[in-house]
Image (tube, rainbow, N blue to C red):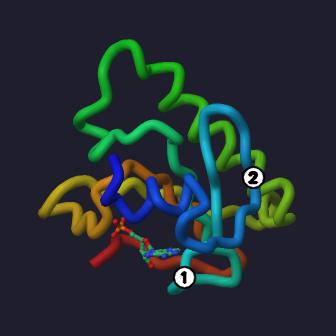
Amino acid sequence: MSDCIFCQIIRGDIASEAVYVDERCYAFRDIDPQGPVHVLVCPREHIARVSDAQPTQEDLLGHLLWVAAEIARQERISEGGYRLVINCGVHGQQAVEHLHVHLIGGRQMAWPPG
Ligand code: AMP
């Protein structure tokens, strides 16, 4: 989608610090990191919310989680653990309407979230 900020990042029209790229997804560092490691893993195709994903995109959803775990290994936070978050819609406080998995780690987390 042309005016989606993450589509613009994926196209390279807006600068980002990429940490992992393949034919299906693009992962880059969050501009406002909530931990020493904070990466957003996005599908290249525009899916606004996880709730919009279609049955044909089931493999893609799994791929995003696999890539997040791979980046965690790359960033050396696997052993200590980390958090994966997908915010969805208004109650989920999703600010950017392009599906993304937050990978946050490198510090102790609290639970439950606010
Ligand atoms: P969410 O609330 O789940 O939609 O998260 C959106 C995330 O995108 C936030 O953590 C923002 O800090 C991050 N963000 C917004 N604009 C940019 C950008 N230009 N580059 C990197 N991260 C961004």
Farthest top residue in view: 56
Local packing at callout 2 (Cα closer than 10 Å; few below 14, some 14-19, many 20+) is some
- Left-right relation of 90 to 59: left
Quarter of the figure with the C terminus: bottom left
Image quadrant assignment for residue 104: bottom right
**Alpha carbon of mark 1 to alpha carbon of mark 2: how far?**
16 Å
Tell me if residue 66 comes above or below residue 2 in the rendering: above
Quadrant where ligand 1 appears = bottom left
User: Horizontal and vertical percent for residue 22?
Assistant: 72, 38
User: What number is the disc on residue 31?
Assistant: 1
Residue 28: % across, % down: 64, 64
The kind of secondary structure element at disc 1 is: loop
Question: Tag 2, which secondary structure?
Answer: strand
Q: Residue at x 82, y 65 (%)?
A: 75
Q: Which of marks 2 and 1 precedes in the sequence?
A: 2
Task: Reply above or below: 4 against 57.
Answer: below
Q: Is residue 71 left or right of residue 87?
A: right
Q: Of the numbered discs in the image, which one, if any, rests on residue 20?
A: 2
Is label 1 in contact with label 2 (beta carbons under 8 Å)? Answer: no
Relative to the observer, which residue lies in front, 8 or 43?
8
Q: Which amino acid is tagged 1?
A: Ile
Q: Quick check: is the Cβ at mark 2 less than 8 Å away from ligand 1?
A: no
Foreground pick, 37 / 113: 37
Mark 2 is on which residue type? Tyr
**How would you rate the neighbour count of disc 1 (Cα within 10 Å): few for under 14, some for 14-19, many for 20 or more?**
few
Vertical order, 88 against 15 (above or below): above
User: For this view, does 106 lie left or right of residue 94?
Assistant: right
**Residue that appears at 66% across and 37% down:** 66
Depth check: 80 or 46 in front?
46
Does the beta carbon at disc 1 come under 8 Å from ligand 1? yes
Residue 64 location (% of width, % of height): 57, 39
